[in-house]
Amino acid sequence: MNKKKIKIKRSFKILLIILITILIVFSINKNKDNHNISVEKVKDYKYILVNKKNKLSSYFIPDNLVEVNSCSLGSFYLEEETANAYEQMCLDSINDGLNISIRSAYRSYDEQKELYNTYLKLYGKSYVDKYVARPGHSEHQTGLAIDLESLECDIFRNSKEYLWIRENAHNYGFIIRYQKGKEKITGYGAEEWHIRYVGKNAAEYIYKNNITFEEYYELFLK
Ligand SMILES: [Zn+2]
């Protein structure tokens, strides 16, 4: 083999090594941004962190889903502890003269996929990136999240039901998950209607300190 050929062969080898290194680094970074949650390793289910970076598998279905009986006009399912907390909150809100209902609760991976694709077709990528979770990245797949509505007012943030939820939800273990001004941390635009069950201790801390669940997670659960 002449010198020229050896040189070309060597250059090719170096190029190949560089390419493989780039591919490895790229795949590591990709995984960092798209961490697959192993639910069986989560110590306390109500603290599970599902967001743009943390993804549930397409097969995951909570094993303790129950149908919601109160403050709900349709057939909606939630994780059992969440359903009990919601029913207690519902009863107290009725006593305070309010009319809260559910627009969405547990959603399967496939339902989220359908929803995502429908919104993508209707409103385009920049809208869905801000408001709709990709399949596997939605808290609704956990059964811990509820989209509320007011039966008195079409725009939830203008309703007295929202004012009540804003001041009282933490007493039942719920947080308003996506707040105005926190978009950079949560990855989503404000959604006054989307509440998430985290239990009373976490909810009270998050409410009093005006932080996100991501920040609470960094402080106490990581
Ligand atoms: Zn929601």
Image: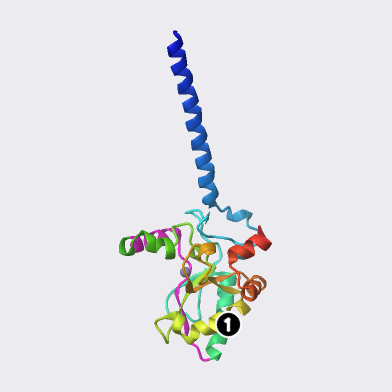
Of the 4 image quadrants, the one containing the N terminus is top left
Q: How is the image coloured?
A: rainbow
Residue drawn at x 57%, y 60% as measured from the top left: 49
Q: Which residue is mark 1?
A: 167
Residue 147 rendering spot, x and y as whole percentages = 47, 73
Residue 62 rendering spot, x and y as whole percentages = 54, 62
Residue drawn at x 41%, y 85% as measured from the top left: 153
Among all residues in the image, which is located at the extreme left?
A: 122
Instruction: Report which quarter residue 158 is drawn in.
Output: bottom left
Disc 1 packing (10 Å; few <14; some 14–19; many ≥20): few
Eyeballing the image, is 178 above or below 152? Answer: above
Asked if one can make out residue 55 in the rendered structure from this viewpoint, the answer is no
| The residue stretch that appears in magenta | 97-120
Q: Mark 1 is on which residue type?
A: Glu
Instruction: Report which quarter residue 45 is drawn in.
Output: bottom right
Residue drawn at x 50%, y 30% as measured from the top left: 18
The residue tagged with tag 1: helix, strand or loop? helix
Query: Which is more toward the observer, 10 or 83?
Result: 10
Residue 161 rendering spot, x and y as whole percentages = 49, 84
The number of numbered badges drawn on the structure is: 1
Query: Which is more toward the observer, 202 or 199?
Result: 202
Eyeballing the image, is 174 above or below 117? Answer: below
Q: Is residue 61 magenta?
A: no
Eyeballing the image, is 105 above or below 24? Answer: below
Residue drawn at x 50%, y 75% as measured from the top left: 68
Residue 127 rendering spot, x and y as whole percentages = 38, 64
Q: Is residue 100 magenta?
A: yes
Q: Horizontal placement of 103 versus 176: left or right?
A: left
